[in-house]
Image (tube, helix red, strand yellow):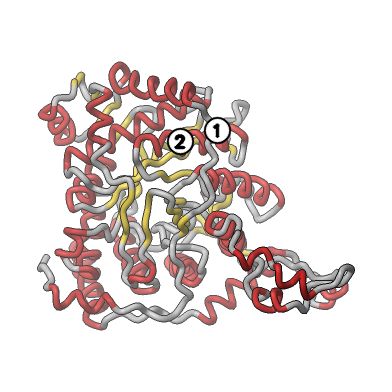
Amino acid sequence: MARRTRASRSRTATPVLGAPASPHIKRTLPFFDILGEDQLTKLEAQVDWMFENVGVAFRDDPEALELWRKSGARIEGDIVRADAQWIRALCAKAPSQFTQLARNPERSVTIGGTNQVFAPVYGSPFVRDLERGRRYGDMAAFEDLVKLTYLHPNLHHGGFVVCEPTDVAVSKRHLDMMFAHMTLSDKPHLGAITEMSRAQDSVDMAEIVFGADVMEQNCVIMGNVNTNSPLLVDRVVTEAARVYSSRGQGLIVVPFILTGAMGPVSTAAAICQAMAEAMMVCAYVQLLRPGAPFVLGNFLSSMSLKSGAPTFGMPEPVVSNYAIGQLARRAGLPLRCGGSLTASKIEDAQAAYESADSMHSTMLAGANFVLHAAGWLEGGLSTGYEKLIMDADRLGSYQKVLDHALDTSEDSFARDAYAEVEPGGHFLGSAHTMRHYQNAFYEPKLSDSENVEKWEEEGATDMRTRACSRWKEMLHQYEAPKMDEATHEELSAYVARRKEVIPDAWY
């Protein structure tokens, strides 16, 4: 495709008004480190043992195996083994922190270090809302969810597959999904990864928005891929890496391990397996392009050993979040883990408990990029409209804890108020209260703290009902962020041109 000039890219530099700006979180709260040096050393030794003795299969991609072979790895069939210190040295080339640019510069996010970025649910084939129930996702639902993510200030990143639009052919839907993210929102987002040409379309469309020379120096799009645990990296991952990483764009690599199925039943072994799988891909990425942005992922969940069903918010995954956080920081890699995860089918008490436990440990563990931070239901099979709004509402409280753990400034001690208020009096009308009342406390929009009489007078609604009203109100008020007309036309033409040459396929 044609390379765009510096002059044509300047049109992306003007901040767009619309939804409130939602910058990422720069935490001041310390990380919650549960492991001592002796335990960490044992875990890292296990990871190194896996690099050297067990290895990871790189399957169905001779080009990937050839790169490993030329670089000095030991190849047996499609199993790649390598010196642990060499793998760690390659991983050290990845940046510990990087910025993904957004179309609106005010919404660019920094991933890594003490920064945390919240993104919505990813990959659900179904959607659910209070009025229409559970149904297959379609393009209308997809656009609704992109708009709601754009509008909510507690979600910093658009993700990508907020639901699967199953009314569009699989071979073409990534084009409509990319177009929706790029035009209905101005937050950063991910791109397609399921097939190499779809990843290439994503990068090419990002180049239309940002320009080739901006892409050469900055991360403007990322791909999110899963290893095929246990210990298998397929061509979806390696080809996505060649498309994204070779252009200097970000790659998130996530082993999805149900302990007892795709990994050993012991949490320690599963954690080490996840580290080994992800770090081997990180090393491969650095062989492709040293310094390419990389996010180490962990999606470790427990399961019912009676039925085989995955379980969420359980103690073992919570502990794995804390442990993987420490290991990722020691490896110098940004981390993706956790989210508001639940096996519940609706937004009930089970969903609240499991999501809260999962998200709280994600927050304390220091996950730098949190996919599934809002909207996850039914083990990831369904995106809930109400769940998205309820989860995002609670993310605001996490954000305040992370970013403003405790203000100890001179004014925070309120000494003037003690001079003003007599013993037995109250502080409601004091000058100190008047100075701070508007932002003294986080006020969730969906929680009802009024007395029961007022609650009954206003309809005695529960939170699901309030969340339903809230998302409908948000969509009613939605206005698309402005986009340069020439950019919009170029994106539209690209989508139309690609659809003409891609046959419909439902796989």
User: Is residue 285 positioned above or below 440 on the image?
Assistant: above
**Residue 414 shown left or right of residue 234 in the figure:** right
Type of the residue with mark 2? Gln
Q: Is residue 166 visible?
A: no
Which residue bears the numbered disc 1? 34
Q: Earlier in the sequence, mark 1 or mark 2?
A: 1
- The picture places residue 363, in percent across and down from the top left corner, at 54, 48
- The picture places residue 462, in percent across and down from the top left corner, at 74, 65
Q: Are marks 1 and 2 in contact (CB under 8 Å)?
A: yes
Residue 326's disc number: 2
Residue positioned most to the top: 53
- The picture places residue 213, in percent across and down from the top left corner, at 15, 64
Taking the spot 65% from the left edge, 69% from the top edge, the residue there is 440
Taking the spot 41% from the left edge, 32% from the top edge, the residue there is 274
Type of the residue with mark 1? Ile
Of 393 and 439, which appears nearest the observer?
Answer: 439
- The picture places residue 41, in percent across and down from the top left corner, at 42, 23
Q: CA distance from mark 1 to mark 2?
A: 8 Å
Q: Quadrant of the N terminus?
A: bottom left
Taking the spot 15% from the left edge, 64% from the top edge, the residue there is 212
**Residue 57 shown left or right of residue 461 in the figure:** left
Label 2's element? helix
The quarter of the displayed image where residue 443 is located? bottom right
